[in-house]
Amino acid sequence: SQQGEEDPQALSIQEGENATMNCSYKTSINNLQWYRQNSGRGLVHLILIRSNEREKHSGRLRVTLDTSKKSSSLLITASRAADTASYFCATDASTGGFKTIFGAGTRLFVKA
Amino acid sequence: EPEVTQTPSHQVTQMGQEVILRCVPISNHLYFYWYRQILGQKVEFLVSFYNNEISEKSEIFDDQFSVERPDGSNFTLKIRSTKLEDSAMYFCASTRVGQPQHFGDGTRLSIL
């Protein structure tokens, strides 16, 4: 079954440092998305990368996708205390239906 | 910016009772989803809905669950006979094809 798995499970860094989170999945995908979730809130979409793209940037975010390795990474540069949250990757299978599978997430803590 | 809204924000129900969770998707979106997140765990796909019918559903979405779009604006999730293990946050999301999903802030369901 398709599954996104992130590592590390938890990451603690100092403000100003970069944070890198990785995601792996198992089946063919149409796209991969990264979401952020603050404690007790809904998910906020950060960035979507399509299966034919290799890298995408949005502000301080950089996402890479390697379909040969079935993996993606999210880099947050110059982190801020406000970046403290859980980050999830999610994949849409290329099976024709609409099924989005989320990974277990990385809990990021940025110390001021 | 348009938002997905969910009501109620918190629902407390006795085990065995029926519960209906409500969502108002973004008005020009055509694809609708329900997800569940048990406290501290990952977001789990329940069901997707398009063109007035279920597109995909997960193993979690058994006969106790149903979805409906009764009036062209609301999108509901019904659990017929709730169990203790149904306690979780339930998120609704909507989207247009090829676009990221927009999530509501969720309904916290507590089964006593």
Image: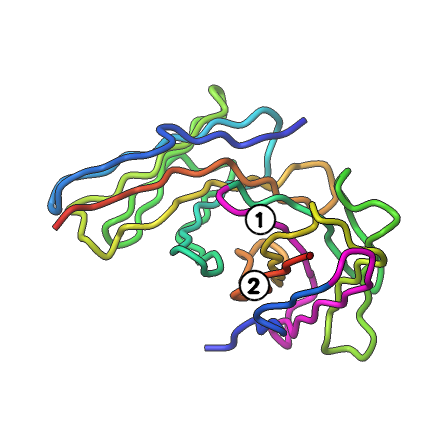
Q: Position of residue A86 (x, y in %)?
A: 38, 46
User: In this picture, which residue range is highlighted in magenta?
Assistant: B14-40
Residue drawn at the location 79% of the way across and 62% of the way down: B78
Q: Quadrant of the N terminus of chain B?
A: bottom left
| Distance (Cα) linking label 1 and label 2 | 10 Å
- Report if residue B105 lies within the magenta region: no
Q: Which residue is mark 2?
A: B106
Find residue A53 and report its image quarter.
top left
- Report if residue B37 lies within the magenta region: yes
Point out which mark residue B18 bears.
none
Q: Nearer the viewer, residue A12 or B88?
A: B88
Q: Which residue is mark 1?
A: B37
Residue drawn at the location 59% of the way across and 68% of the way down: B10
- In primary-sequence order, the first of circles 1 and 2 is 1
Residue drawn at the location 48% of the way across and 43% of the way down: B40
Q: Position of residue A17 (x, y in %)?
A: 13, 40
Q: Is residue B24 left or right of residue B59?
A: left
Q: Position of residue A100 (x, y in %)?
A: 62, 44
* B93 w.r.t. A4: above or below: below
Query: Could you say whether the residue bearing mark 2 is in a helix, strand or loop?
Result: loop
* Residue at the limit of the structure toward the top, as seen here: A69
